[in-house]
Image: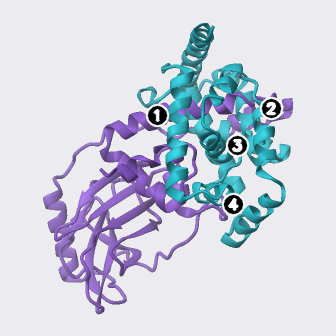
Amino acid sequence: MANGAHRRLRSVSGAAQSTADELLQSTARGDEAALAKLYDLLAPAVFGLAKRVVRDPARAEEITQDVFLSVWRFATRFDPAKGSARTWVMTLTHRRAVDVVRANAAASRREQRVGAMHDTPYDTVLEEASSRLRGEQVRECLDTLTELQRESVLLAYYGGYTYPEVSALLDVKLPTVKTRMRDGLIRLRDCLGAWR
Amino acid sequence: MNADVHALAGAYALHALPPDEAAEFQEHLTQCTSCQEEVAELQITVTHLGAAVAEEPPPRVREAVLQAVRHTRQVPPVTPIRDAEPPRRRRRTWLAAAAAAVVVGVGAAGLTAVLDEPAKDPIATVIDAPDADSDVTQIRGGGQLTVISSEELGQAVVLSKNLPPTGADQVYQLWLVDPDGDARSADVLIDAPGAADVVQEVEPGDQVAITREPAGGSQQPTMAPLAITKPV
């Protein structure tokens, strides 16, 4: 059964990916309609991720606009050899969202935020993250991670925390967090299948 | 490289590295093909975490995007760099200018912040620019320079490391050298074995050079460059 799920995931994401790649390449040639189609294809993922990280729908809308305007402007620099269009757009989105979260983080505010996180238990963050996951396979695969791997990955990705912040939140040594993030993602990668 | 640096691939893909470590890892990436592959794969992996929380945005966002697109020019594609002049000649011209101490076009350019988001870390801004490109240059006498530049931003992050100590009366100074061989101060002085600095007002074709100068820096370089990078 697990195999079947992986195969399905592979073919679905494969088809969507080539479409996104083609649309981005047309966008690079100034095709506004291609960008509109690319938007329709990727905007839910972009908006959903931005909202998940910044937790502010208005800011998430701004980020979504910002990301697609960047996609338009920089489509000419997209290099399919370095990765898919979808990954490119989502990486940009996560970066922007994380920047928004960290922008108001002068060092002191960041500390406060970490402090505040201790007041609202971080497992609420994690619980919320997990319960909202739509992708069945992603959820199943997250279950294959150790608890520490999963917490490290999710706090960084959805919480927008740096690894020193994650280390403080989980009360785990810095090198341990670094390793768990990598090991966790590798395990997730292997579970989701070796698609490209 | 050492296993410790490799271990950062996960945190890097999660954007969980503080800016200085992100810059350091980025530099490592330029030399480590297996790390590039791993990062690419882990970026695909985290993309699925993103897609898992997908949510339809309000229709106004789509309208705003398409409206903005109609009024926004796309950046030009990258074209192959013409190797117009061999670096040697460039260096000589530059030195001649230095020797004559001709102050041409060297104003106090100053570090004018031209960032869209002033609150954001300026180093991260350059490193994460979609057109960021990096290159590593060894320094004569020891150490190395890594330049991560964004043509679009007109900025570069210059990472220096393992610089030999200069003594208290000298500092390292960074310069921008234009295609005519004229050097202008990048307004960056380094008095530590390593540093990460943002250089502003970088023009396409500029090279980054480093010299040792009297403490306080010089208006024009007083020595041949210890290193000069490829044109950005």
In the picture of the structure, the residue carrying the numbered disc 3 is: A158
> What's under tag 2, amino acid-wise?
Ser
Q: Residues within 10 Å of mark 4 (few under 14, many from 20)?
A: some
Q: Could you give the CA–CA distance between mark 4 and mark 2, rounded to whole angstroms?
A: 28 Å
State the residue position of label 2. Answer: A131
Q: Which residue is mark 4?
A: A103
Which amino acid, mark 1? Answer: Ala
Q: Decide which of tag 3 and tag 4 comes sooner along the chain.
A: 4
In the rendered image, residue B56, in percent from the top left (x then y), is placed at 81, 28
SS at mark 2 in the image = helix
Chain coloured cyan in this rendering:
A
Q: Chain of mark 3?
A: A
Residues at marks 3 and 4, common chain?
A: yes
Chain B pictured colour: purple
Q: Amino acid at mark 4?
A: Ala
Residue behind mark 1: B40
Q: Nearer the viewer, residue A8 or A27?
A: A8
